[in-house]
Image (tube, rainbow, N blue to C red):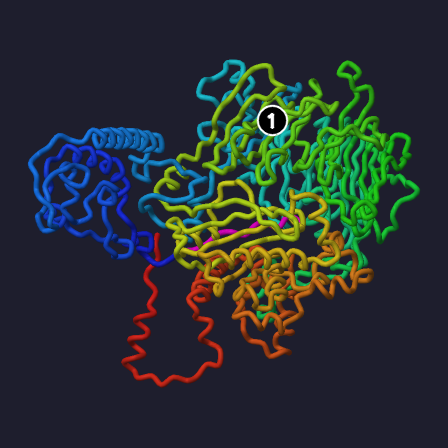
Amino acid sequence: MASSRKEEGGLSLPENIGDSPGRRPSHDSLSSVSTTSLVFERINERIMKDSRFNEKKQRHDPLNGTPYVDHDDQDSLKDEHNAASDLETGPFLAGNNDGETGTKQFGIQRMDRGLKKIIIIVSSLVVVGWLAGLFVYVSTQAYKHPSQMDHDPEATSIRGTGKQITLDQIQGGVWYAQRHSISWIAGADGEDGLLLERGAAGKDYLVVEDVRSQADTRDAIAVQRRKTLMEKGTFEYNGKEYTPNDAIPSKDLLRVLLMTDRQSNWRHSSTANYWILDVQTQTVDPLVPGEPSARVQLAQWSPTSDQVVYTKDNDIYVRRLGYSTAKRVTTDGGAEVFNGVPDWVYEEEVLASGTATWWSADGNYFAFLRTNETGVPEYPVQYFVSRPSGKQPEPGEEAYPEVRQIKYPKAGSHNPVVDLFFYDVIKGDVFEVEISGGFADDDRLITTVVWAGNKEVLIKETNRVSDVMRVVLVDVAARTGKTVRTMNVKALDGGWFEISQKTKYIPADAHKNRPADGYIDTVIHDNGDHLAYFTPLDNPNPIMLTSGSWEVESAPSAVDLDRNLVYFVGTKESSIQRHVYSVRLNGKDLSPLTDTTIEGYYGASFSAGAGYMLLSYQGPKIPWQKVVSTLSNPSHYEHVIEKNDELAESAKKYELPIEIYGTINVDGVDLNYVERRPPHFDEKKKYPVLFQQYSGPGSQQVNKKFNVDFQSYVAANLGYVCVTVDGRGTGFIGRKNRVLVRGDLGHWESHDQIAAAKIWKAKKYVDGSRLAIWGWSYGGFMTLKTLEQDAGETFSYGMAVAPVTDWRFYDSIYTERYMLTPQTNPDGYASSAVSNVSALSQNVRFLLMHGVADDNVHMQNSLTLLDKLDLAGIENYDVHVFPDSDHGIYFHNANRIVYDKLNNWLVNAFNGEWLKIADAKPKEWKSDSIARERRSLEVPSRVH
């Protein structure tokens, strides 16, 4: 769940839903200019009869069918249906009268001087107003049809009538911004600005390119630096043709590791057949000598390009080039012992990767984790339709489901025992370095391993509940080590350490004013996450590179060692924005690389030498990407690689929701929100409101990214208001507000959602009887927890997908970081569980959906809640389960059904259908009335 993705997507709606007749034609928006022109014409008119005004045809607003008048008819100088409206002989001038009021009619007389001044003044004001109106009209491009206008994320209203977005579009990727990634690669001689291209049109299959060659104007030097690594997209071995799934060049670019027949394991890991391609001869050999079909879990080049370390069947091997055999490094690998690769929980919650092997810079050593799962209990994941293992059942056993037994440590149970070992390539031996003062086997997490040069290694360890950390420095040549830094964050603020894999080694260079080795790390400072530079390696007191009431994110992004520049992404301008910055290693000259005067959400990836940056603008306007030179590059370069023109055109033609950003104050804390309003929002109407949230520790849903998702569909198509509030516990609003939730997940988060709902319920445009909340994963847990805590007082409906319902059922490393262990915090676990089913019964109705084969949030969570509801005789809910689907719920059309169900269930809820099903009574039907009812319920065909 630490990296649980946000589940968005969707399906379609009935045909012609985007062609609603209830919109004012877009040409009506042009009437503002003709209005002022007509005023001047009428000043010069002689005598206008009442009948001329009465002859005007009455027109109707197509939005609601009620009569309306043009803007010119509303002008203050217009007639009020009597003769006094005559602009020359009316009340402004002495002149005729109708004789019916008892006053005389006089002949034409000279205009009163005072009255003349008034007319001149009024006329001048009208001219000024007309010119001002013309300026606004032109400057805002109001003369353009909405389909010609660029998408404006800051718009508070929408002109004209566009098309409606559909769930089919969202599910089909119509609203996804095209994004490109660059596989930056260092040149064989250290050249910067090189990238790896695979399968590009018109080029050899695998090519190393200079990034400058991507521009329209070809750089001669850049073209010369191009190098083909693999000519064709297939290769043959023993008469059989293979197609690579991936390719990994050696550092010297003379050979390439090729992967074929890759099969996914967990979120990050996979197995595949590996091959070594000789670039010069374009010939291949199996990585595992004599075993072309061997299933390899992991393979990595050494930095010296002359050997490969790989893991097969959980044992490590080293293959040196030029040798026909591989050396076996470990022999104890098996079903319960993992060498060089992580088990399920370390892959998911610690390393966020399929590798647990790390080479030294000179290739003479590598470090690896040995994970012993002997004491970890198993959890069975059942597959009733498919057989993911690919194995066929024994004859007569075809009717039984396939069961995958996963070593899954739940909160409070046995954790895997993890140790760090080293392999000396020259001596050929495996060794471990014992350091006093460490954590016991059952209380140790090894979270980070970073080589500091050729002979030293930095290792971060924490206790089981992630609130005490020590940093260890190991000298592998001397086979000794020491603790160089410790921190007890529980004593500091009662919180926890988040795991980061971004620690960066900084080598000594006296000529660059770096007398000793060091490293950059993220530390807790100024109520948030900030960058610190520790030098020498054993110095516990850092130079702070950043500080203030903002935070860095996944930092550092890159380091330029020649100029002592550190690049990173941070929230300095706003907690819901991201900009790219640089700072020197002495903590000075912090400056932005992006334009901070304009709201923006940026991401960046840097070339190997930090001279180039792929800058990704992600919102709030239409996303774009370009490659630019950085402060580390004396030559200016800029090339746009993606403008998302097609997406921009769609945003012009379709009506997207109005997005209102702001903060609400709950218990003295400012919380970010985004409110998505229907395109033609009318404050005089009463709207139902859907709250969407995730709310997990350190997460963020409210940001300035361009995003058209299910929530956008709810607002723009269904016409509901959709609100997201990031409550306490979420990220980037200060560590104090983040760690508050520790020990009782769900309490403060649901408190804040309920407080937000009460604020919206009080708004004049909200129908307070129609409030709903929904979420997936942690968001599903929060949906149920909010409904439980609210007990029907504020929310009437909820939709929970793949929820945790009891934190004792989730994995130990994630859960105990925020909840401690069930043994030490039994009351907290009891409080955080969704167990007050009588409170749930006070809501009108809720929906529960879960994948049967969810290996992350086990279906055990939903099943145990259903049992509690059964025991209490509570029935105000609906359930949908998905066979063989994991946490993402995709198997056999499942994701489409998820969003179809969310859509239809929500519409029925806000239509009041769920109010009609309590205490159901039988109804007597006649055959003809049944037919009529069926016809009225027929669903139109979908919009495509």
Which quadrant holds residue 330?
Answer: top right
Task: Judge whether 804 appears above or below 711 on screen.
Answer: below
Q: Is residue 109 left or right of residue 384?
A: left
Q: Amino acid at mark 1?
A: Pro
In the rendered image, residue 249, in percent from the top left (x then y), is placed at 63, 30
Q: Nearer the viewer, residue 55 or 579?
A: 55
Q: Is residue 16 left or right of residue 909?
A: left
The number of numbered badges drawn on the structure is 1
Residue found at x 48% / y 36%: 623
Task: Judge whether 392 appears above or below 460 on screen.
Answer: below
Q: Which residue is mark 1?
A: 592
Q: Is residue 370 visible?
A: no
Q: Magenta residues, as a range?
A: 1-11
Task: Judge whether 580 appears above or below 798 on screen.
Answer: above
In the rendered image, residue 552, in percent from the top left (x then y), is placed at 67, 36
Residue found at x 25% / y 45%: 74
> What main secondary structure does the magenta stretch of the protein show?
loop
